[in-house]
């Protein structure tokens, strides 16, 4: 067996299941889960219709590269959303079966395990796929802690000079999971300079890009690269590859539809890799994806639902814990030390007493540089409808207020 498998940590939800062993939640309350970031808003009817009308495509083998129409729809969306020059759909865009599969696979494509001490860098806390991909590609993860005082940005200037030459891949998530923080143009300029100097590939995870709570959409990696003069020349978007998905944007997590885009040299190698190991997207899913990427009305409606929830729930929770409206995404990243409980104690007791599930922040991070930056925090996924989100917040407030009376 592959010895790297023994390095994998239990997934956060398996840790949560173990935390709840022996707990019987209070039957006076209906269960509400804020634990898993699975969109719960209804799938738009026009996407369902496009999927069902294309079932005849099941009679054909799809290509790994996807159809010209799908790549064109993705390229068109990127151009409209980010104001970037027209991408070449044949060389700069590749459909994938959800961003998770692609984020995992890119490490196997990029990492050269024959080099001494290869590293894959990621923020901490982080999406667990980054770590697993690093281990199974024969590299080691290197974590850069997010800092509350920097709006949960990572301080890459804190990384020792001796580390950078070993970094082969840098995962970024903006808007971030779980913090909701977004990268600025100055952040991108610093990261591009580091990538140019040391030759690593930047994998920008942008699956939460369309859920934001202010008037301005988050800056995208391709957008930042274009503004910094990196979208042209012999190798446009050098060492940058962007990952996105329809799951959150269009409420279709079961479709498993996303894309990668950016540096054509990296895309070419990734297509070769996926020809051998990546499942091609089925024709009905491709048809439904084209319909989804070509429509923005449902995206705005979806975003408005999240805005309503966050603007109702965040002030309620601020009464009892330290939490702020994030830049974007559908998570609240809250400090629960005012409760007098650790993050795991908080999650276990809240589940037992009020039948609300939240995820301990320490499960989403690793101890690095002397701290676990997720410790004493919880992640709450506001994915259900508005009424259920408000009900969950009401119970959490009641729980925290009851703790003070004990």
Image (cartoon, grey):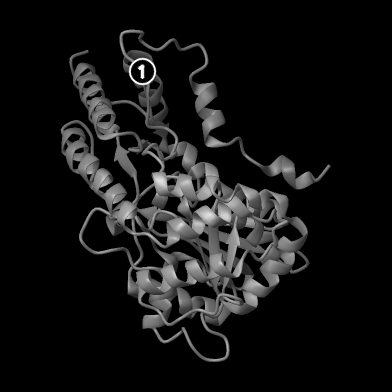
Q: Residue at x 67, y 74 (%)?
A: 268
Residue 229, position as x, y percentages in the image: 41, 87
Taking the image as shown, residue 322 lies to the left or right of residue 112, namely: left
Q: Residue at x 72, y 50 (%)?
A: 59
Taking the image as shown, residue 180 lies to the left or right of residue 132, namely: left
Residue 236, position as x, y percentages in the image: 53, 84
Residue sitting at the far right: 1
- Residue that numbered label 1 is attached to: 355
**Is residue 42 shown above or below 153?**
above
Q: How many marks?
A: 1
Residue 295, position as x, y percentages in the image: 37, 59
**Is residue 239 shown above or below 101?**
below
**Is residue 380 shown above or below 116?**
above
The residue lying toward the viewer, choosing from 119 and 331, is 331
The residue lying toward the viewer, choosing from 11 and 373, is 11
Q: Quadrant of the C terminus?
A: top left
The residue lying toward the viewer, choosing from 169 and 261, is 261
Q: Quadrant of residue 219?
A: bottom left
Residue 23, position as x, y percentages in the image: 46, 12
Find numbered disc 1 in the image and state the secondary structure of the residue it sits on: loop
Asked whether residue 125 is in view, the answer is: no
Dot 1 alpha-carbon crowd within 10 angstroms: few under 14, some 14 to 19, many 20 or more:
many
Q: Quadrant of residue 215?
A: bottom left
Asked whether residue 235 is in view, the answer is: yes
Taking the image as shown, residue 116 lies to the left or right of residue 197, namely: right
Q: Residue at x 45, y 35 (%)?
A: 36
Q: Quadrant of the N terminus?
A: top right
């Amino acid at each position: 067996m592959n010895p790297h498998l023994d390095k994998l940590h239990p997934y956060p939800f398996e840790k949560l299941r173990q935390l709840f062993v022996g707990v019987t939640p209070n039957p006076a309350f209906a269960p509400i889960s804020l634990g898993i970031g699975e969109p719960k808003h209804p799938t738009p009817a026009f996407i369902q219709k496009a999927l069902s009308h294309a079932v005849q495509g099941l009679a054909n083998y799809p290509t790994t590269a996807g159809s010209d129409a799908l790549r064109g729809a993705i390229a068109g969306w990127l151009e409209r959303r980010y104001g970037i020059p027209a991408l070449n759909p044949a060389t700069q865009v590749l459909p994938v079966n959800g961003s998770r599969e692609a984020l995992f696979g890119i490490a196997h494509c990029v990492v050269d395990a024959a080099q001494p001490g290869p590293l894959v860098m990621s923020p901490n806390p982080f999406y667990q796929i980054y770590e697993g991909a690093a281990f199974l590609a024969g590299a080691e993860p290197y974590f850069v802690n997010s800092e509350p005082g920097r709006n949960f940005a990572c301080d890459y200037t804190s990384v020792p000079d001796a580390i950078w030459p070993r970094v082969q891949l840098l995962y970024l998530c903006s808007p971030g999971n779980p913090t909701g923080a977004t990268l600025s143009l100055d952040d991108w300029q610093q990261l591009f300079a580091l990538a140019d100097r040391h030759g690593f590939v930047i994998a920008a995870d942008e699956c939460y890009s369309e859920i934001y709570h202010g008037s301005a959409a988050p800056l995208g990696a391709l957008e930042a690269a274009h503004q910094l003069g990196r979208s042209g020349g012999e190798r446009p978007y050098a060492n940058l590859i962007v990952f996105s998905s329809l799951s959150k944007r269009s409420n279709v997590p079961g479709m498993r539809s996303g894309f990668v885009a950016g540096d054509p040299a990296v895309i070419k190698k990734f297509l070769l890799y996926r020809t051998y190991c990546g499942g091609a997207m089925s024709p009905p899913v491709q048809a439904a994806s084209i319909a989804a990427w070509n429509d923005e009305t449902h995206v705005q409606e979806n975003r408005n639902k999240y805005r309503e929830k966050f603007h109702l729930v965040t002030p309620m929770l601020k009464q009892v814990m330290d939490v702020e409206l994030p830049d974007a995404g559908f998570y609240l990243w809250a400090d629960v030390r005012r409760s007098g409980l650790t993050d795991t104690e908080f999650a276990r007791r809240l589940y037992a007493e009020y039948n609300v599930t939240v995820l301990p922040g320490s499960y989403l991070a690793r101890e690095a540089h002397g701290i676990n930056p997720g410790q004493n925090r919880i992640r709450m996924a506001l994915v259900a409808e508005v009424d259920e989100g408000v009900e969950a917040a009401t119970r959490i407030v009641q729980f925290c207020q009851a703790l003070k009376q004990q």
